[in-house]
């Protein structure tokens, strides 16, 4: 029977209630459970070669130890003060940037993106993103009455398209009077690309020029920072230059850095040279917390604060994470070797959970791969491969399927 009226507001009718990545992951898991030999490279979570989720023992021990009446109570709206301070120190140490920063707790990195969208764009305005971007950016902006405006991510040389970003900033300042641009580096999701020091210098020049004409905000989504290898914190060197004429936001999360995806603990860090403006930002972020999730996971904040500040715990977590980084790097090295031999086209890929393989038809490529029991995520112009969950021993099979899939799409 069809209801004569719908109580669902017109603007949210006919929405999809699940994420495409989780849909493909569910199909892969169902086929594997039915006994098929499935290679599932869809989900962005680091797993052991046997498929078990990687964890950090020290993190688990700390969270267990802190369980009790204190952690069961409400956390402060903007977050536990020790946690907020620890996040800023984790990013910037004791230097001058820490004295020009505020942080607010969020439910994972997703909450940090939401805060940026809600507080630095008006309804109807758009967020500037590279043409390859993390898919949920679209849902986060759309849910808040905003939108996305992609600029070309790569130029003809396969490097970051600084000119495309500059044109986007100019366009947004002209059409909406402000600009919010997301830079998901290092270890960009979904391409695996990391900006070089020279590229960051050019980004600074572009932001500096745009920020002299109107309000510009740069959001650095640093979710994969701890798995970025030697360039993991190269973006920090760019922050002072970006701040000359812009607001800088940073998305921070324990999902990847502490292998606690389900804890949903993150933070948004804001930096500005003007203390009065920084206070306004802090208040706006706190207001948005109360208006949405009210407060975040108390136990997770207490644990993260200790894990970031206790020297013994810091050393133990660093050692445990190094083992996971080595596991991931072995997969990256193997993939790069086999991909070069197969002639696959990818961005520069040195570190991170994902790599994108370019294809003229992503849906045809992904379908041909699924026929062979290999799952990747189709994205416009490429398929995203989650090497974080792909055992090194299966990479020859993965690359073979990619080669066949790209050929089927040509």
Image: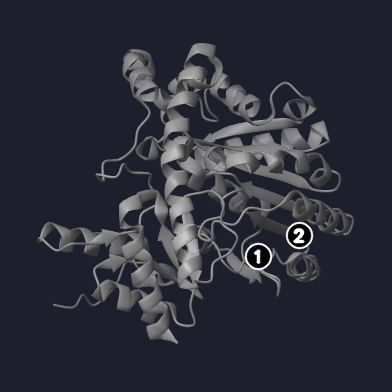
User: In terms of image quadrants, where is residue 192?
Assistant: bottom right
* Quadrant into which the N terminus falls: bottom left
Q: Are marks 2 and 1 in contact (CB under 8 Å)?
A: yes
Return the residue at label 1.
125
> Which of 176 and 356 lies nearest the eye of the viewer?
356
**For this view, does 385 lie left or right of residue 227?**
left
User: In terms of image quadrants, where is residue 244?
Assistant: top right
Q: Secondary structure at mark 2?
A: loop
The answer to whether residue 376 is visible is no
> Does 275 appear above or below 64?
below
Colour style of the rendered protein structure: one colour
Q: Secondary structure at mark 1?
A: loop
User: In terms of image quadrants, where is residue 167?
Assistant: bottom right
Identify the residue at image location x=40%, y=56%. Answer: 386
The percent coordinates of residue 394 (x first, y second) are: 31, 57
- Which numbered disc covers residue 227? none
């Amino acid at each position: 029977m069809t209801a004569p009226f719908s109580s669902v507001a017109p603007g949210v009718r006919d929405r999809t209630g699940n994420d495409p990545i989780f849909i493909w992951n569910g199909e892969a898991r169902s086929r594997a459970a039915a006994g098929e030999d499935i290679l599932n490279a869809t989900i962005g979570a680091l797993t052991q070669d046997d498929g078990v989720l990687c964890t950090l023992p020290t993190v688990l021990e700390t969270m267990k130890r802190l369980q009790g009446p204190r952690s069961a109570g409400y956390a402060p709206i903007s977050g536990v003060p020790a946690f907020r301070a620890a996040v800023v120190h984790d990013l910037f140490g004791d230097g001058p940037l820490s004295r020009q920063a505020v942080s607010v707790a969020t439910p994972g990195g997703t909450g940090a993106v939401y805060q940026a969208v809600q507080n630095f764009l008006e309804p109807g305005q758009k967020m500037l993103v590279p043409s390859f971007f993390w898919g949920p950016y679209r849902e986060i902006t759309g849910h808040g009455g905003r939108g996305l405006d992609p600029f070309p991510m790569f130029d003809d040389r396969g490097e970051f398209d600084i000119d495309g970003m500059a044109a986007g900033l100019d366009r947004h300042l002209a059409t909406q009077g402000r600009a919010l641009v997301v830079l998901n580096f290092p270890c960009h999701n979904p391409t695996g690309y990391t900006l070089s020091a020279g590229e960051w210098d050019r980004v600074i020049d572009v932001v500096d020029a745009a920020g002299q004409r109107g309000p510009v905000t740069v959001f650095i989504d640093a979710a994969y920072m701890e798995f970025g290898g030697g360039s993991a914190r190269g973006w920090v060197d760019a922050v002072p230059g970006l701040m000359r004429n812009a607001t800088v936001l940073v998305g921070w999360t324990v999902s990847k850095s502490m292998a606690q995806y389900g804890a949903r603990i993150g933070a948004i860090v804001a930096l500005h040279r003007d203390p009065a403006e920084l206070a306004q930002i802090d208040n706006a972020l706190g207001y948005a917390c109360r208006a949405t999730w009210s407060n975040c996971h108390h136990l997770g904040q207490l644990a993260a604060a200790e894990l970031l500040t206790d020297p013994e715990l810091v050393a133990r977590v660093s050692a445990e994470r190094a083992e996971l980084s080595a596991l991931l790097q072995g997969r990256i090295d193997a993939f790069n070797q086999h991909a070069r031999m197969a002639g696959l086209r990818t961005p520069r890929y040195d570190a991170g959970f994902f790599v994108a393989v370019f294809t003229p038809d992503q849906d045809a490529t992904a379908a041909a791969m699924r026929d062979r029991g290999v799952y990747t995520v189709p994205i416009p112009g490429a398929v995203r491969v989650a090497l974080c969950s792909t055992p090194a021993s299966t990479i020859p099979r993965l690359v073979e399927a990619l080669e066949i899939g790209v050929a089927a799409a040509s």
